[in-house]
Amino acid sequence: MSSVVSRAAPTEEATTLTPPLTPPAASKGVKEEEPADANIPDNYVSWTIKNQKPRPPISWDNWWKELNYLTISILTITPAIAIYGAFNVPLRWETAVFSVFYYFVTGLGITAGYHRLWAHRSYNASKPLQYFLAIAGAGAVEGSIKWWSRGHRAHHRYTDTELDPYNAHEGFWWSHIGWMLVKPRRKPGVADVSDLSKNEVVRWQHRWYRTLIITCGFVLPTVVCWLGWGDFWGGYVFAGAARLCFVHHSTFCVNSLAHWLGETPFDDKHTPRDHVITALCTIGEGYHNFHHQFPMDYRNAIKWYQYDPTKWFIWVCSQLGLASHLKVFPENEVAKGQLTMQLKRLREKQEVLTWAPDSNDLPVISWESFQEQATKRPLVVVAGFIHDVASFLDEHPGGRHLIVKMIGKDATTAFFGGVYDHSNAAHNLLSMMRVGVLHGGIQHGLDDKRVPPSQRLRVARYNELASPYASSTAASDYEGMLG
Ligand SMILES: [Zn+2]
Ligand SMILES: [Zn+2]
């Protein structure tokens, strides 16, 4: 039984499970494996970082002992063959077309197979599709499904920490390729892959992995070009080595470029980012900010016009009956993440602006005192606030005389339509001239006149709002935005 079980006819066990639906011991003859993270301490991350010693730092004295010679060989010999071949083997158009095609086939093995199906269980795949993806993925020569998914689950769970095998905080080149060229500095954080251990396709691929990489990485593309149009060496160099090089660096970009270039429209807590360039480089895995927020969503790109061929491939497979149960995160929750980030940006803009003083920040002045002070400087009352309009007398578009007439008086009615229905900008500007609050002057029903238009939809943090959840002493039952 695969890790992905149809929900159409749930078994008794399956109904009691929360998704992903992975019935225990579903595979005949396979011993039930306890999840690797079943008994970890609550402070696992800090505990492990503190108590589990990393490998010694790489220095001139030990670097040759710290290298991973197998991956170095694969990642240097392949491009060497490609570069040497590119200068010595003519490229035929049939081979060029097939190489691009095979790049997408093997790339999809990783993106649609290793990544979205096995590492994240974002949809269910039929057996034929699973075998296709396992074989195609082997042609990308990036390790077995089980090894790859185990590292990737740790990457998601411990993003940007030392337990993340390709921790982006270690730098672009480390997360791109460096982490594979040396022995892992730490064991990746624990991540359960017991569901994959039970999957017969995953186990089959793991068992035959060496044969599969040689066959799918080099033999198959060479033979296709040789038997197809007699281009043995072109097949080996372009569809084999050069194509493999591109697939490698394309998928490596998901760990490097996708944590480095672009925007964070859903969350900026960690390094993953969204960018169309990354999407173009990675067969659609470029909307990585979304992906880290909603890893079980079968999509990376949520807009129809964004480039995500992996999503298109999975969708086509579902239309053909090869895939099912494509998981989509609730639109409402996705929108919340986006809105949070938008409000955060607005808040940053809001914070650099100067705002009108609040009634709590101003002295309370009696009508008599106001009258007396108005004989010395131009003070006008509007909506319970006392304004010093000295700087504005000569700037008033309606003329100085209209303001002078209101000095020492309440100009609320005149300001709000009695003489002229002032614009929002005028109201905002007036609020900046506040110097006091008239004692007993803020009457009920004046709220819309008291709060300048620019402050009616202010972005406020939860602890700045008077809510039952806030520590504010000014408890009130109004909620949401200030204004
Ligand atoms: Zn990532
Ligand atoms: Zn992922």
Image (cartoon, helix red, strand yellow):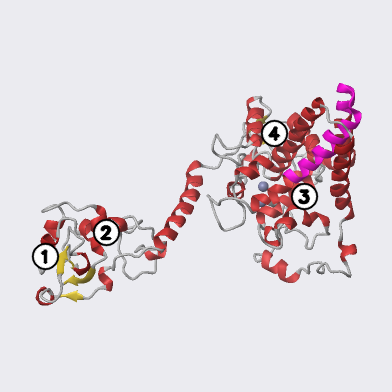
| 247 within the magenta span | yes
Q: Which residue in the structure is indicated by mark 1?
A: 404
Q: Nearer the viewer, mark 3 or mark 4?
A: 4
Disc 2 to disc 3, how far (Cα)? Answer: 66 Å
Identify the mark nearer the N-term, 2 or 4. 4
Identify the mark nearer the N-term, 1 or 2. 1
Disc 3 to disc 4, how far (Cα)? Answer: 23 Å
Disc 1 to disc 4, how far (Cα)? Answer: 79 Å
Q: Please state which of residues 451 and 110 is positioned toward the viewer in this rendering.
A: 451
**Residue 453 versus residue 88 in the image, above or below:** below
Label number found at residue 428: 2
Dots 2, 4 in contact, CB < 8 A: no
- Quadrant that contains the C terminus: bottom left
Q: Which residues are magenta?
A: 223-250
Dot 2 amino acid type: Asn
Identify the mark nearer the N-term, 3 or 4. 3
Dots 3, 4 in contact, CB < 8 A: no
Identify the mark nearer the N-term, 1 or 4. 4
What residue sits 70% from the left and 68% below the top? 47
Q: Which residue in the structure is indicated by mark 3?
A: 33
Identify the mark nearer the N-term, 2 or 3. 3
In terms of secondary structure, where does tag 3 sit?
loop
Dot 3 amino acid type: Glu
| 301 within the magenta span | no
Q: Please state which of residues 333 and 34 is positioned toward the viewer in this rendering.
A: 333
In terms of secondary structure, where does tag 1 sit?
helix
Label number found at residue 125: 4
